[in-house]
Amino acid sequence: MPIDIHLNGTPLGHEIRGVDLNNLDEQTFKDIDDAYKTYGVVVIRDQKLTPDQQLNFSRRFGSLDRFVFDRFNMKENPEIFIVSNLLDDGKPVGMEDAGRYWHSDMWYVATPPRGSFLYAVEVPHDGTRPLGDTYFASTRYAYETLSEPLKEQVNQLSAVFSSRKYGEYVGHTPEKAKDNIYLKEVVAAREKIKNNEITHPLVRTHPITGKKSLHVVQGVISQVIGLSAQDSEELIDTLVNHVIRPEVVYRHVWRVGDIVLWDNYSALHRATGDFKLPQRRHMHRTTLSAPKIN
């Protein structure tokens, strides 16, 4: 039988129901993979995954990347990146504030990964509702709904994605880390990419689906090649705001056992930092490599 997909009224973030990721036949896996390709972000709830089981499921989609900041990768399973606000002997277990800006993952490398799969082990709660929601927006839908003149313009443009600008934008600087143990760890982890400047086109074609998407990240692009600083900033603001229009954003409210699969080429996401210890958030992320296209 085909999988049960519950649509939510936005272009992405739809829920696949009634599957057990530890017991997937080939047809059910293909249906999940097809939904992932079609929508860019899909949600599967009520799973019970050990790290090894998450890795086994993730590898069915292709090879995996290690997150660039090895400090926050699981020692026993380094292909799992830990997103967590927990402490062990006063030191961060994982990256606490990962992604609290609109972004696609690992934009600071020449060939960003295809996608990420995030599994909820612990979810913070205020006694009334879960905290730490994640927002998703479709860059594919955004591209498809641009005006034709703007679409024609951005098809020809590339931009500089700057790690230094990102660090200043999100506050990951040595000055702000002086009295903050966690930020010291993050700044140290970012040392090898702190000066990275990568040029990416503002429109990218998905290597598997062939669909075009905007390639923009909030607070990261320092220049659009061929435009003045002011024109660059105005264009990027226009594009980002078009992507994250409230009516097309999916807000995921986490539950323990959720796994969310997002396509890095056709979606942006942003985490919410509305919690702090003793409210505990602990998640495991696997990262799907860029596909090898012959």
Image (cartoon, rainbow, N blue to C red):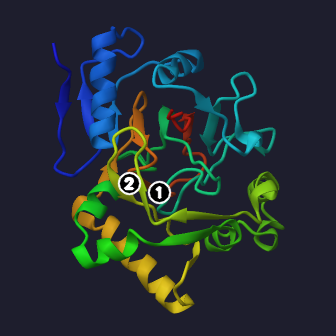
Q: Nearer the viewer, residue 90 or 2?
A: 2
- Badges 1 and 2: C-beta atoms under 8 Å apart? yes
Question: Could one spot residue 147 in this view of the protein?
Answer: no
1 or 2: mark nearer the eye: 2
Query: Secondary structure beneath disc 2?
Result: strand
Instruction: Say which residue label 2 marks.
Output: 135
The residue depicted at 77 percent of the width and 66 percent of the height is: 195
Is residue 73 in view? yes
Question: Left of 94 or right of it: where is 179?
Answer: right
* Residue to which mark 1 is pinned: 272
Quadrant into which the N terminus falls: top left
Q: Secondary structure at mark 1?
A: loop
Percent coordinates x, y for residue 53 in the rendering: 52, 15
Name the residue at 42% across, 27% down.
Answer: 257
Residue nearer the viewer, 110 or 40 = 110
In the figure, 88 relative to 62: above or below? below
- Left or right of 212? Residue 278 is right
Q: Quadrant of residue 280?
A: top right
